[in-house]
Image: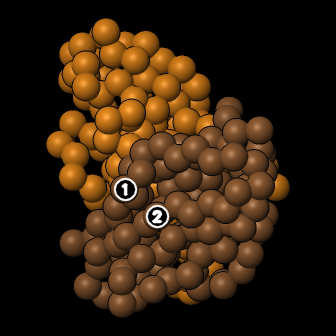
């Protein structure tokens, strides 16, 4: 199976702009989670989508939003970009079938490197 | 609240020496714990999970509920083990990661 793909891989934006990142999960996976990775804060959970519904949300401001489509592909949007939003944004997909622990194994994409200037 | 602590940001050992990467967690429920690894220029990937009680690439990790720890161990380090290691806790349907430990194996 093809792995998780993320587009674009690199992005440079200026403060105040908005950005949309895309994630295509592994075929058959219904859950997509997003993380922000920075040197200072490490990996921080943004949100999780399952069957087009947001299931969980991390402690990020409302400028960070996302959605999931019927084919499980997901997009993440950040509005009014700030310098501190510069980070690697990782997407991960999982099967999340019956709720067994094994179903929560997450497969990560390569990430989108966002630089805000 | 869920919290994962990896006290060592950097760990350096010689090839052939034992390795232990520490992980402590805080969670009021029954935790599911994982170790993820990121090799240079590769994606973050699952190394092992406590539920499976498996050994992957010579690594093992035992969940100690009394000490709320899930330390990762390997008796004899190899150069290819150099990577970034993250301990993660699955609580109420979300995965919380520790800050990570960069392991360097010296020849």
Residue A48 versus residue B41: which sits nearer the camera? B41
Q: Secondary structure at mark 2?
A: loop
Pointer 2 or 1: first along the chain:
1
- In the shown orientation, is residue A94 left or right of residue A28? left
Q: Where does the image place residue A110, in percent across and percent down from the top left?
A: 62, 38
Relative vertical location of residue B107 with respect to residue B68 in this rendering, above or below:
above
Residue at 54% across, 20% down:
A10
Q: Where does the image place residue B35, in percent across and percent down from the top left?
A: 56, 64
**What chain does badge 2 belong to?**
B
- In the shown orientation, is residue A85 left or right of residue A61? right
Say which colour chain B has: brown
How many C-alpha atoms fall within 10 Å of the one at disc 1: few (<14), some, or many (≥20)? Answer: some
Which quadrant would residue A36 be assigned to in this image? top left
Relative vertical location of residue B32 with respect to residue A47 in this rendering, above or below:
below
Q: Is residue A46 visible?
A: yes
Q: Secondary structure at mark 1?
A: loop
**Residue wearing tag 1:** B7
Query: From this viewpoint, which residue is outermost toward the left?
Result: A61
Q: Where does the image place residue A40, in percent across and percent down from the top left?
A: 32, 35
Relative vertical location of residue A55 with respect to residue A17 in this rendering, above or below:
below
**Residue wearing tag 2:** B22
Residue at 27% across, 56% down:
A58
- In the shown orientation, is residue B55 left or right of residue A86? right
Residue at 42% across, 76% down:
B69
Say which colour chain A has: orange
């Amino acid at each position: 199976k093809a792995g998780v793909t993320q587009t674009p891989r690199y992005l440079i934006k200026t403060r105040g702009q908005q950005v949309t990142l895309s994630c295509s999960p592994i075929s058959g996976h219904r859950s997509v989670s997003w993380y922000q990775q920075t040197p200072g804060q490490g990996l921080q959970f943004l949100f999780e989508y399952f069957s087009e519904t947001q299931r969980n949300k991390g402690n990020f401001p409302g400028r960070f939003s996302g959605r999931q489509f019927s084919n499980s592909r997901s997009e993440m949007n950040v509005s009014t970009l700030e310098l501190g939003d510069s980070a690697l944004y990782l997407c991960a997909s999982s099967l999340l079938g019956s709720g067994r622990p094994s179903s929560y194994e997450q497969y990560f994409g390569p990430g989108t490197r966002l630089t805000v200037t | 609240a869920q919290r994962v602590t990896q006290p060592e940001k950097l760990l350096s050992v010689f090839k052939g020496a034992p390795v232990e990467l520490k992980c402590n967690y805080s969670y009021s429920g029954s935790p599911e714990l994982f170790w993820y690894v990121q090799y240079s220029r590769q994606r973050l990937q699952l190394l092992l999970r406590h539920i499976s009680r498996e050994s992957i690439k010579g690594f093992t990790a035992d969940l100690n509920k009394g000490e709320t720890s899930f330390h990762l161990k390997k008796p004899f380090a190899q150069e290819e083990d150099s990577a970034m290691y993250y301990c993660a806790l699955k609580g109420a349907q979300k995965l919380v990661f520790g800050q990570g430990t960069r392991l360097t194996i010296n020849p």
